[in-house]
Image (spheres, rainbow, N blue to C red):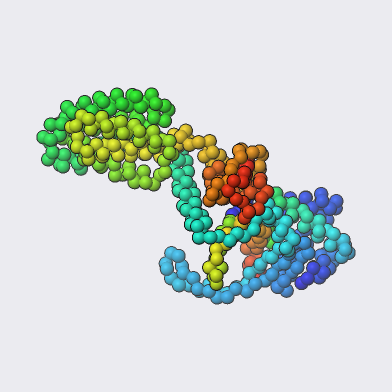
């Protein structure tokens, strides 16, 4: 159960509204409203039941002793039976309250639909994660952006012994590295021209690469592989945790393939090294993408933007027009459409409302209109 | 306590007759309905909070047949007694 709004009407406001509606004086109205609720609370305790026509029944209900577990200590405790006040609204009032959703009936599901719903639940929880990841404030976004730069520097210390053992090897491939660096710079500049997204992402990679070249130049013996592998691991976990907007990933994957190809052509790397290099790039990109909300926003389509606005609750939106017509295909459901257009399957009642059709009688080929929703 | 007894009590406190009390109760319920219709909650100190809450759609299973049903979302009126009222119960 979710709360709809936090706007609370207090006693004074209620009295005011009542006085206006009844045409009685304010003083008298105050006395009336006060007596009204006083009698209810008094008599429900005295007699255990108060019926008010038009509103409903207030009832005293006894609860039995029940066992529970203290969450902190794990200890078993007994919650003693007590009495509580129940309120059962009259059926007319119930119907009035539920009017916005009155068009819906309970639907029988087959197994397929159950699985589908479960899957959509997963998806929406994923997208919730994504939103959480992208809603980082600009301040913290800057902090995380620095990560790829600082990490290798910190890691040089613990890695040195291992690197030292491979000292000669590292020196041997040194010129090749430099050449690859140049090639990469060239590829980078091409990628930079690709667009804003690519522009924002690649500098991070750029910095990572140069941090790596430098220790080699001094002959400290840092090998590419070891450093990159180390870089990949933490970044990879970030990658798994955050869902990256599709377009960004697509862009970087294309660019990555270019880099990987160039490196293999030169032939001074074995494949595993190229792979780890490529994944390091991806990871760095992922890091970057996750930390900067604007990037994801750029990459996402306009409906995603709407989903942020429409994420909250079902009764708080107005239908202001038609976004587009949609031809129902096999296996389409209103929940699926809601997920597609608004990013939340919870908004499906609006589609149903807009079309005024029996949800159970929809068939493939039917045309439904998708409403435009505006926050109330 | 049924509605008639309730109206008698109310009319006694407010020095009006029963039919007037009945009318005014209806007016008050109308006012309350409008408040809930607008999505607001009625919070009265010493009594409690009457508010409309949304129950999400859910899948329920008939335990004997195993048939799964999608129960649509609905809006319900809830009453949460204030702590003062709860205290009086003890």
Q: Position of residue A192 (x, y in %)?
A: 37, 26
Q: Nearer the viewer, residue A125 or A366?
A: A366
**In the picture provided, is B23 more to the left or to the right than A114?**
right
Question: Measuring 82% from the left and 69% from the top, which residue is drawn there?
Answer: B4
The residue furthest left is A168
Question: Measuring 24% from the left and 27% from the top, which residue is drawn there?
Answer: A181
Q: Quadrant of the N terminus of chain A?
A: bottom right
Q: Work out whether residue A263 can be spotted.
A: yes
**In the picture provided, is B53 more to the left or to the right than B18?**
left
Residue A63's quadrant in the figure?
bottom right
Q: Nearer the viewer, residue A296 or A332?
A: A332
Residue A157's quadrant in the figure?
top left
Vertical arrangement, residue A227 with respect to residue A17, above or below: above
Total numbered circles: 0
Question: Measuring 19% from the left and 34% from the top, which residue is drawn there?
Answer: A269
Q: Work out whether residue A312 can be spotted.
A: no
The residue furthest front is A365
Q: Nearer the viewer, residue A100 or A221?
A: A100
Q: Position of residue A342 (x, y in %)?
A: 56, 43
Question: Measuring 34% from the left and 31% from the top, which residue is drawn there?
Answer: A255
Q: Position of residue B51 (x, y in %)?
A: 66, 56
Q: Position of residue A373 (x, y in %)?
A: 62, 41
Residue A198's quadrant in the figure?
top left
Q: Quadrant of the C terminus of chain A?
A: top right
């Amino acid at each position: 159960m979710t709360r709809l709004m936090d706007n609370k009407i207090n006693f004074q406001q209620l009295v005011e509204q009542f006085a206006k509606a009844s045409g009685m004086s304010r003083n008298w109205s105050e006395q009336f409203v006060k007596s009204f609720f006083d009698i209810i609370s008094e008599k429900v305790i005295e007699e255990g039941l108060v019926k008010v026509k038009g509103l409903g029944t207030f009832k005293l209900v006894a609860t039995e002793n029940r066992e529970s577990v203290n969450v902190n200590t794990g200890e078993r405790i007994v919650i003693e039976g007590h009495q509580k006040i129940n309120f059962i609204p009259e059926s007319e009032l119930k119907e009035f309250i539920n009017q916005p959703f009155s068009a819906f009936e309970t639907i029988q599901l087959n197994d397929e639909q159950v699985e589908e719903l479960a899957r959509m639940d997963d998806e929406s929880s994923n997208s919730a994660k994504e939103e959480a990841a992208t809603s980082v404030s600009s301040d913290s976004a800057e902090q995380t952006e620095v990560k790829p730069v600082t990490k290798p520097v910190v890691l040089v210390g613990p890695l040195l012994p291992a690197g030292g053992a491979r000292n000669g090897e590292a020196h041997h491939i040194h010129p090749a590295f430099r050449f690859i660096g140049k090639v990469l710079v060239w590829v980078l500049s091409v990628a930079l021209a690709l667009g804003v997204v690519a522009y924002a992402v690649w500098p991070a990679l750029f910095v990572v690469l140069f941090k790596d070249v430098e220790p080699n130049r001094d002959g400290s013996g840092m090998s590419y592989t070891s450093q990159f592998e180390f870089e990949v691991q933490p970044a990879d976990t970030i990658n798994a945790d955050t869902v990256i907007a599709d377009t960004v990933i697509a862009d970087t994957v294309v660019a990555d393939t270019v880099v990987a190809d160039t490196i293999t052509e030169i032939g001074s790397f074995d494949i595993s090294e190229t792979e780890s290099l490529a994944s390091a790039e991806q990871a760095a990109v992922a890091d970057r993408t996750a930390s900067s909300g604007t990037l994801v926003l750029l990459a996402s389509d306009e409906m995603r933007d709407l989903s942020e606005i429409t994420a909250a609750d079902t009764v708080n939106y107005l239908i202001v027009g038609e976004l587009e017509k949609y031809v129902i295909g096999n296996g389409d459901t209103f929940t699926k459409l809601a997920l597609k257009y608004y990013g939340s399957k919870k908004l499906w009642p609006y589609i149903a409302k807009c079309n005024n059709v029996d949800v159970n009688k929809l068939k493939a080929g039917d045309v439904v209109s998708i409403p435009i929703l505006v926050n109330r | 306590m049924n509605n008639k007894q309730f109206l008698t009590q109310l009319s006694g406190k407010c020095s009006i007759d029963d039919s007037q009390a009945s009318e005014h109760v209806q007016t008050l319920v109308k006012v309350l309905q409008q408040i809930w219709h607008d999505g607001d909650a009625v919070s009265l100190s010493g009594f409690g909070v009457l508010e409309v809450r949304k129950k999400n759609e859910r899948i329920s299973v008939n335990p004997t047949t195993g048939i799964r049903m999608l129960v649509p979302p609905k809006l319900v009126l809830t009453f949460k007694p204030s702590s003062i009222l709860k205290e009086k119960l003890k």
